[in-house]
Image (spheres, rainbow, N blue to C red):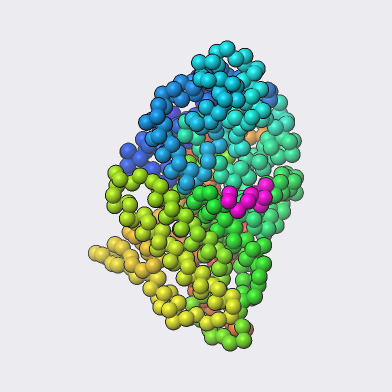
Amino acid sequence: RAHQGMAEVSLFGVGRLMDFSQFEPRGHYTDQPELERYFRSMMWLGRVDFRFLETQPDGTQRFQRRQLEGAYALRALAEAKTLDRYTRIDDAIQAFVGESDYMTLPELDALLKDLDLADAAGLAGVPDDRIAEVLVKKGHGTQRISSHIMINGLGKGTLPLSSSFAMLGQRYVVDSHVFSNVVYDRVQGGAVKRMMPNPLDVGFAALGNDQAGLLLGSELGQFRYAPDLHMMRVLVDAHPADFWSKNLYNRWLVALRELSPSRALADTEGLPEVAKTEAWGRRLLNTQLASWAELRHDTLLYAKQSYTGGATCEFPDAYVDPYPAFYARIAELAEHGSKVVETLDLSSAPWLEEAVPAYFTRLHDVATTLGEMATNERAGLPLTQEHLDFINRAVKIQMGCGSPEGAEGWYAELFFNVIEGVTQDPTIADVHTQPTDEVGSPVGRVLHVGTGLPRLMVVTADPCGTPRAFVGLASSYFEKITEDFARMTDEEWAGSIRVTRPDDVAWMKDLVSR
């Protein structure tokens, strides 16, 4: 059914509109049959939910006792040993991506407590309306991201999300939360039919980049969704520090947030003039979104997808992006990653017990050194000989019989598998689904964000008042919308961009020479 896209099926005794395109293996899961089966299984466990309070097309919510009982049947099967295994799996996913956006197995016990029941057998004696009342009052199964096909039968207003349980429910990520709230039927209370979000929404609201907001000018005017987007920006910005340190996904995002103008330009001392320009700002925004696209690619199976310069100075022989706070966040991410690994049972793959901590140590050391260099640049201090030696050890290609077969150097070691460092590896991830158009006709539009080959960047910086040209690499970032619920794999994307170079996003076209 994977290629059928949207289809209605009977599930748990009631009709449900399913998007079977989600079960098409993609991302890192297309190389081996075992991984393809794992993908489909985990996608089922992550997306097929038991809807205790199921939203109807007219906006009402219907209590589904059979689905509640089904969830507790699963809970009954999870005896101590099974629950321990489940918890270990869930904890691992949570450490990498975050908490489930659905009710979880242990939370089923909390619902029984709130119903003053000793066990699930007592549910039979509790009226439907009483269970529904407790579900709403206590917030059991409350979702924040709209991730299923929901047809608004009213044609206006905002449908509430169902209260749901999922065995290994997909994870809450703030960028999907942003997307979910800036499209129909959540924009302007359902009065505006903005059917597809713009990744710049994530740039502005989730990554805190004000320049992204300016680039959204025409869309903000057309769809009048500035209040909704601003609300999501306020919500994301209000998250306390511990939210950003809870998992590797959030640590990646908060590192990217350090590149936004409000942070990157908070202290301009030591920055070259070019770093204060609007064009440089767009270059950083491009970097943020390219990195975010990689993040969504790597978490495609688990992240819940939304549905609709100084007085004395010498010229450096190298120049790194002058943002110490960004490198500090990456170093913190590496430290946290090492701690997460310590909690995982890797006894079945002993080599990982050494390889994974060693990787995070390398990442921490590289980020620390780059941070030192950025700090020197901002203070107007020359790079030390150690720094220059470090730059000259970045990467060295190891040639085989006419083609690269590996690489060495600290940049190559930033790849867990060094061979991947010399492999062309464009990636793509679907991040939002639009089931219908404005009049309800099925269209199955899917928004993808992807990366291509690195670009050569030439920039003039004047750290000492005398311009000097520096040459380096920059990320490439692309967007693509497909129809009929077509979800692209990395292989399909790589094949297409080898044949036809994809269009640059509109706000980068004048910065890219083609």
Give the magenta range: 235-243
Left or right position of 8 against 35: right
Say if 33 sits above or below 137 in the image: below
- Residue at 39 percent across and 35 percent down: it is 85
- Towards the viewer: 396 or 51: 51
Q: How many marks?
A: 0
Question: Which image quarter: residue 386?
Answer: bottom left
Quick one: quadrant of the N terminus? top left
Question: Which image quarter: residue 464?
Answer: bottom right
- Residue at 32 percent across and 38 percent down: it is 33
Residue 347 x/y as whole percent: 30, 45
Residue at the extreme bottom of the image, as rendered: 312
- Towards the viewer: 503 or 35: 35
Say if 470 sits above or below 282 in the image: below
Magenta residue check for 242: yes
- Residue at 73 percent across and 31 percent down: it is 157
- Residue at 38 percent across and 46 percent down: it is 344
- Towards the viewer: 1 or 462: 462
Can you see residue 264? yes
- Towards the viewer: 455 or 280: 280
Residue at the extreme left of the image, as rendered: 401
Residue 327 x/y as whole percent: 52, 65
Residue 206 x/y as whole percent: 62, 51
Can you see residue 153? no
- Per the picture, the main secondary structure of the magenta-coloured stretch is helix
Question: Which image quarter: residue 308?
Answer: top right
Magenta residue check for 173: no
Say if 483 sits above or below 151 in the image: below
Residue 30 x/y as whole percent: 37, 43
